[in-house]
Structures are given as C-alpha cells and as structure tokens.
Image (cartoon, rainbow, N blue to C red):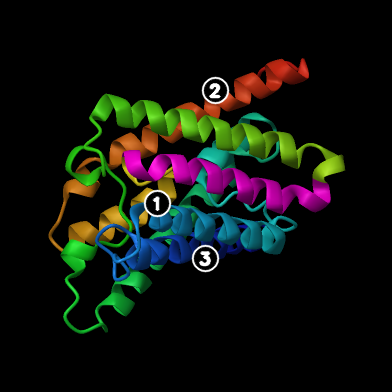
C-alpha cells in the first residue's frame, strides 16, 4: 500500500510541476510567448497550475490524498491523516517527482533551436533579482508563508468536510489558482517546496545557482504557513492541537 501512495505522490507532483512550469516557459515575462501581456501571462500560468491541481486531485486523492506538496503533507501529518513514515515517504516522492518534471522540461526546451534556457528558465522561484518586482528576502518569506497558509487552510477544510467531497478538486484547484496569481509577481509563486526544488536543482546543473541558493526560503516559508494553517484550522474546529 505504501508503494502505491509513494507512486501516487510522485506522479501527481510530476504532473503538477511539469504542467505548471511549462506554462512559465510559454507565458512568463521572458518566455517563448512573451508577446503576451504580463497580466495575461500571470493569469495563464495560474490557471494551468490550478487546473493541473484539480486533475491531479481527482486522479490520486483516493490513493494518497493527492497532497503533491510537502507543506500539505506536514499539515496532514499533524492533523493525524498520515503517519510520520508516510509523511517522509510522501515528501521524498514529491521532491523526486518535481525533479523529474523539471528535467523533462529542460529536455524539451533543449529541442527548440535558438532558445537560451538560462534566460528562459524552467519556472524557478526566487526573490531579489529573481522577483518581477525585486522583492527582498523578508518580503519573500512573508508572502510565501501567507499564501501557503491560505492554500493549506482551504485544503484542510475541504478534505475534512464530506459535504464538499464532489467539489473538493475544484475548490483546491481554485485556491491554488488564486494564490498563484497573487504570488507570481512577488516570488514566482512557490506555495510548495517541491515546486521550487525541481527547477532550482536544474538551474544549478545549468550553472545558475541563484535559485538553489535561495531555495531555503521556499522550503521553510511554506512549512511555516502550513503549520499556522493547521493551528488555525484546529482552533476554528474547536479541536485539540497535536
């Protein structure tokens, strides 16, 4: 059973990260379709992430819960939905899935003549020089924690309310779309440590280590946001905090 859950999280994260970061390559400010307006690009990227999350949730939620995000897995562990061993396996699967997704995107981009992958990127997140608005590190930590808090709080409410079972994928995907729209101008919108991990490693392999050097922000901040979301969820439900 654990191997099915591992593969579910690996494949689900792979699909989410590949589809979402491919949208970055097509619609981002330096992307192949950079003739689009900035607003259109942001909305397009966010919609792809949201739809991908919706599809992934409906495909894999019955197997593993379709966390596809270490921040969600940490919150679900504290909420008692998965064991410590399962949480670790989920996170390993998610990181591996994201890395494979970024590697595949790199392989596809290499097949396009006259494309500078260094300039185009593979959907990496970041602050300062990697931020559309040159956001500093304090702002990056804050916005990532807040947006992840919103997303994980929605996730916890939706998956624990039987009345929302049929709409769960749409609501979770919609929440990801919303926070991604808001997050792109600031940091590129991580909200998911795995989503930042894959592109950062690939860019380092290409000789650009900035995203990897900044990765700790996108590992730590979403986890902080997720833990606060769990605490707030428990307080709202009137339940004991683990």
Q: Nearer the viewer, residue 91 or 220?
A: 220
Q: Is residue 166 magenta?
A: yes
Q: Residue at x 65, y 46 (%)?
A: 172
Q: Are marks 2 and 3 in contact (CB under 8 Å)?
A: no
Q: Position of residue 8 (x, y in %)?
A: 61, 62
Mark 2 to mark 3 CA distance (whole Å): 27 Å
Query: How far across and down, in percent of the image, does residue 176 sit?
Result: 55, 46
Near mark 1 (Cα within 10 A), the count class, few <14, some 14-19 or many ≥20, is few
Q: Quadrant of residue 156?
A: top right
Spatial CA distance of label 1 from label 2 is 30 Å
Q: Which residue is mark 2?
A: 228
Circle 3 crowding by C-alpha within 10 Å: few under 14, some 14–19, many from 20? many
Foreground: disc 3 or disc 1: 1
**Farthest residue toward the right?**
163
Residue in the picture at 51% in, 39% down: 71
Q: CA distance from mark 3 to mark 1?
A: 24 Å
Instruction: Confirm whether residue 1 shows in the render.
Output: no
Foreground label between 1 and 2:
1
- State the quadrant of the N terminus: bottom right
- Residue identifier under label 1: 39
Question: What is the span of residues highlighted in magenta in the rendered image?
Answer: 165-186
Compare marks 1 and 2 and give the one earlier in the sequence. 1
Dot placed on the residue nearer the N-terminal end, 3 or 1 = 3
**Nearer to us in this view, 151 or 66:** 151
Circle 1 SS class: helix
Residue under the point 30% across and 53% down: 124
Residue 41 found in image quarter? bottom left
- The number of discs equals 3
Name the residue carrying label 3. Answer: 15
């Amino acid at each position: 059973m654990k191997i099915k859950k591992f593969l579910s999280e690996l494949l689900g994260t792979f699909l989410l990260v590949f589809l979402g970061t491919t949208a970055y390559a097509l619609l981002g400010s330096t992307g192949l379709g950079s003739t689009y307006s900035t607003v259109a690009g942001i909305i397009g990227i966010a919609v792809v992430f949201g739809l991908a999350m919706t599809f992934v949730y409906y495909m894999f939620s019955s197997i593993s819960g379709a966390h596809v995000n270490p921040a969600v897995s940490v919150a679900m562990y504290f909420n008692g939905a998965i064991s410590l061993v399962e949480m670790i396996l989920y996170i390993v699967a998610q990181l591996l899935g994201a890395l494979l997704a970024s590697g595949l995107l790199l392989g596809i981009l290499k097949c396009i003549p006259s494309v500078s992958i260094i300039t185009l990127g593979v959907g990496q997140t970041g602050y300062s020089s990697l931020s559309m608005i040159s956001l500093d590190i304090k702002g990056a930590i804050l916005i990532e924690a807040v947006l992840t808090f919103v997303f994980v709080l929605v996730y916890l409410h939706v998956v624990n309310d039987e009345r929302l079972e049929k709409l769960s994928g749409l609501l979770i995907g919609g929440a990801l779309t919303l926070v991604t729209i808001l997050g792109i101008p600031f940091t590129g919108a991580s909200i998911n440590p795995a989503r930042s991990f894959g592109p950062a490693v690939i860019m380092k392999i290409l000789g650009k280590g900035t995203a990897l050097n900044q990765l700790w922000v996108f590992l730590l901040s979403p986890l902080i946001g997720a833990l606060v979301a769990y605490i707030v969820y428990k307080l709202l439900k009137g339940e004991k905090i683990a």
